[in-house]
Image (spheres, rainbow, N blue to C red):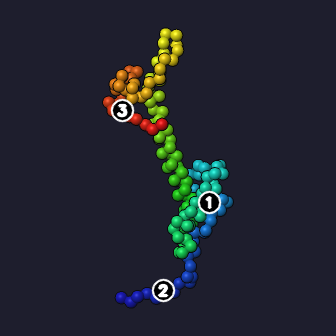
Amino acid sequence: MALPILTPVSQMSKVILPVTGNTANVTNEVLPFGMYLDSDDFISGAADQVAFTYKMLGGDVLDIELMEGNVYSSYETAVLEYSSIINSHQAENVLSNYLGMTSGTFDEDGELLTVRSDVEIFRIYGHRRSGIWQSQFLWNVGR
């Protein structure tokens, strides 16, 4: 089998990632969801991400065959994922309040006597609190 003879028209790729991003190019056409287009911080962060990607992938040494839109799209996806992680963590932190965790002890005049820690409440009441069934395991979350 004979090898084909290649005669390329150009020695450079048509798509090369620029050194820096442009905030004007962060548009609804390049973002998969466009959820943060009204945020100036997101738009400037997306443009800065192009320079970061260029440096991290060695754009000064070789041609990076990515478009700015690829970086903006990945940046939006990463911001959405980070937001999901933060919201999930916040939900875990306030879960005990919604499950009826005792927040203090009051006397007959309505005065707050003491505020007990989650561990102390667990030791006293076990895995049933306020008539709501909960796991037999003690779930501690960061504060």
| Residue hosting label 3 | 138
Q: Which mark is residue 106?
A: none
- Nearest to the eye among marks 2 and 3: give it: 3
| Residue hosting label 2 | 6
Identity of the residue furthest to the top in this view: 108
Tell me which residue sits at (53%, 84%) in the image.
8
| Residue hosting label 1 | 47
Circle 3: element type: loop
Circle 1: is it few (<14), some (14-19), or many (20+) Cα within 10 Å?
Answer: many
Tell me which residue sits at (62%, 65%) in the image.
20
| Residue situated in front as seen by the camera: 35 or 142 | 142
Q: Earlier in the sequence, mark 2 or mark 3?
A: 2
Where residue 1 sits: x, y (%)? Answer: 36, 88
Q: Earlier in the sequence, mark 1 or mark 3?
A: 1
Quarter location, residue 54:
bottom right
The amino acid type found where label 3 is placed reads: Leu
Circle 2: element type: loop
The amino acid type found where label 2 is placed reads: Leu
For marks 1 and 3, give the CA distance: 45 Å
Circle 2: is it few (<14), some (14-19), or many (20+) Cα within 10 Å?
Answer: few
| Residue situated in front as seen by the camera: 135 or 108 | 108
Where residue 116 sits: x, y (%)? Answer: 44, 24
Tell me which residue sits at (54%, 64%) in the image.
53
- Nearest to the eye among marks 1 and 3: give it: 3
Tell me which residue sits at (55%, 61%) in the image.
71
Question: Label 1 near label 2: C-beta < 8 Å?
Answer: no
